[in-house]
Amino acid sequence: MPHDPHLYVSYSAGRDWLSRCIQIATGRRVNHSFFIWQDEHLGWVTLGANANGVTLETWQNFAKTREVIAMFRPRDGMPSLWIGLDALKNEIDERYDYLGLGGMMWVEIQRARGKNVDNPGSKISEWFDPKHKKTFCSQLQAAVIRRTGYQLLGGRLARTIDPGEEMHFIAGDGDFAQFPPPPLAEASEG
């Protein structure tokens, strides 16, 4: 199979307790966002913010515990997401923002009431440890998408965007096209 040079934004539904909590809080099936690409040496790999921080994982291992809902990339001729990831590459291996994830509960409750608010958990996280950047999945992905030059949900702070609403926006944006995820049989091919 030929090498695919694109960086994709992708969305999944995990099966663990934390994933279920996110689904309950957001009212959406999608509870995780991540990047996927075909590395010429490692095969298909994912990059995303998870309990261990911002980490790289093989597609084979990732797909064991999650159902992939959708995968998108910019349409041909549009700027590549590699631009944004390159600009934010120092966030790889940063810590996970657990306080920010907790703060998303407040954001979701207020959103259900028709209000847009900042994420108090992320603000506290920054206040306690301003030298270390912490992030959660959709916050990282929104930052990369925006750094590439795409508009994403207006001027809302990345730390207030959940994976499901991000996917819904990308799916309706004419700059992105949807593609099927790679089969697991191709996961180990480089």
Image (cartoon, grey):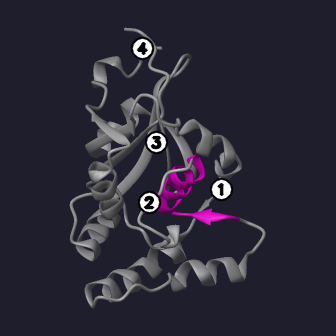
| Residue found farthest to the right | 131
Occupied quadrant, residue 18 = bottom left
Occupied quadrant, residue 20 = bottom left
Of discs 3 and 4, which sits in the foreground?
3
Q: Which residue is mark 4?
A: 189
Occupied quadrant, residue 128 = bottom right
| Label 2 SS | loop
Q: Earlier in the sequence, mark 1 or mark 3?
A: 3
* 105 up-or-down from 98: above or below: below
Q: Which residue is mark 2?
A: 152
* 103 up-or-down from 70: above or below: below
Of discs 3 and 2, which sits in the foreground?
2
Label 3 and label 4: CA atoms lie apart by 18 Å
Residue 134, given in percent of the width and then of the height, sits at 62, 65
Q: Earlier in the sequence, mark 3 or mark 2?
A: 3
Q: Amino acid at mark 4?
A: Glu
